[in-house]
Amino acid sequence: MKKRLSGLIAVVIAFMLLAPGCSRTTRYEYEQPLNVVNDAYRTWYEVFVPSFYDADGDGTGDLAGLTARLDYLNDGKGGGLGVGGIWLMPIMPSPSYHKYDVTDYENVDPAYGTLGDLERLVTECHKRGMRLIIDYELNHTSSQHPWFLSATATLQQNPAQPAANPYLEYYNFVRGRPAVGSYARVGTTDWYYEDQFSPSMPDLNLDNAGLRTQIQKSTRFWLDKGVDGFRLDGVLYYYGGNNSGDTDRNVAFVDWLVDYCRTIDPDAYVVGEVWSNASTIAEYYGSHASSFFAFPFAQATGVVASTLNGTGADASAQSFCKATAAWQRMLQEYDMQAIDAPFIGNHDTARPAGFFSGDLQKTKMAGGLYLMMSGGPFVYYGEELGMTGSRIDEDKRGPMQWSDTVTTGMTKGPPGMDPPVLLFEAEEVQDKDPGSLLNYYRRAIRLRNENPEIARGTVTVLGGIADPEVCAIAKAWNGSHIILVISTSEEAKVVEFSRTANQCTGIRGYLSTTGAAVTLRGDRLTLPPMSIVVLK
């Protein structure tokens, strides 16, 4: 495969206006047979269970509700959104609405259902070829966890000479308030405990052998239930006070946990949250976890949004393509088996429809850019509908917008949430609109499922393009290659593309934000505004 497109792409019409009527959705003629590979390179869907679908009518989403709507995600027959896996945000018992402060590591919160409900969900996911992973909160527990209650009771009974209690070693207790770090007081004693997130979330001492045995026990419990892996919360904060992060110790702990997971299930998928810069995230791949989230490409200030909003150094299609190639190389320096985890938004960040100010084209294109990246991307529930939410965390976790008219299954959302602002139609309307954001996402994920090179391919940026708004990359995998040509221009582009020189016979599929078709006549490739084409 040549690293330069021979006469490839020379833009011959810099700005070409679409003919009247071309903004309407053109009949799509390139659907290919599915070629889904059963491995860890999947498109994942993040679900906040209480906001997704309510099966029992109490206003809180539950596991039974998610099971009832699995066909929306993947019906096992090529229909639905097409995702290959689900990440459940915390489901373990907890006193908070978000459940990130656990009181029992081996149960389901009663508000969400039962262990039996979870097992049914796992079974139904597996029937459809989907995997299911759950959030795992190991940096801290709830202050209501029995371990912590026992430990603090011991300290308060005799602060001067506490009785022996193994749970005292499960947490980071110190006598006298440290000058550095975040610590909370135990009652009126002179004992303090580390609480990097909140006094209601005491940090665990992950070096303790007894605690590690408990973690292994709980890990086996969930894997034995059929869960396919874990999303590790707050990995950056496992070791190191004052949110500093001790990378070497954090990596070593993740490596220990991943190794244990794979003694039980060799295919266990583990993805970690390291909310940091590119070089720090890359270092964590030394743990041999499957993936870490690609924060540099996400959010309103990340590479994807900057590419489309025309700000900063990452403000062009060409810089985007170069960034994706450089990112892949960086990760593989630490682990050749690294599986990137790109995303545009999650439960902690503003939703993209909001930070693109309701611009449907940009919202679509943002999805297209990160869904064409290598690895296993994560779609946040409702993102495919253009849901909004940014002011507070509760707003980012609002009710899934199934319908404007039918209340069945609708949830009430987190307490304290602002009323949802709907920029686009609900699911029942978008489902029937070929030009909707929902159907754009379906098409993007379908392209991944038709062309395994998109997820798995080694990326090479192809030269020969002068226009910064157009770029091309090759992805080679398993003896096959595809070429992605990306235009971030708000105008149509026509480029010269030598099929012979670039070993491509034609179009495999495309993503169009306007509904206009991508065409290839001879060696002339016509790209509608903000579009992506797959060539092979």
Image (cartoon, rainbow, N blue to C red):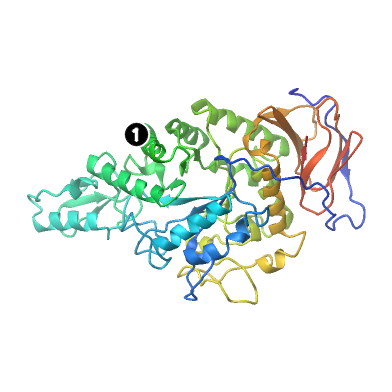
Q: Residue at x 90, y 58 (%)?
A: 21
Quadrant holding the N terminus: top right
Q: Classify 395 as above or below 207.
A: below
Where is residue 322 drawn, in percent x and y? 66, 32
Outermost residue toward the top in this view? 2
x 92%, y 35%: residue: 522
Q: Position of residue 158 (x, y in %)?
A: 8, 55
Q: Quadrant of residue 212?
A: top left
472 or 232: nearer the eye? 232
Name the residue type under label 1.
Arg
Point 35% across, 61% down: residue: 93
Quarter of the image for residue 382 reads: bottom right
Camera sees residue 28:
yes
Q: Which residue is mark 1?
A: 249
Residue 249 x, y percent position in the rendering: 34, 34
The residue closer to the viewer here, 100 or 113, is: 113
Q: How many marks?
A: 1
Kind of element beneath mark 1: helix
Do we see residue 391 in this rendering?
no
* Residue 110 as seen in the image, left or right of residue 493: left
Q: Is residue 240 left or right of residue 402?
A: left
Q: Is residue 181 left or right of residue 278?
A: left
Question: In front here: 428 or 172?
Answer: 428
Quadrant in the picture for the C terminus: top right
Say few, some or many: other residues with alpha carbon within 10 Å of mark 1 (under 14 / 14 to 19 / 20 or more): some
Q: Which quarter of the figure has residue 410? A: bottom right
Question: As displayed, is residue 454 above or below residue 436?
Answer: above
Above-or-below relation of 67 to 166: below
Q: In the rendering, at what x and y percent does residue 485 appear?
A: 76, 37
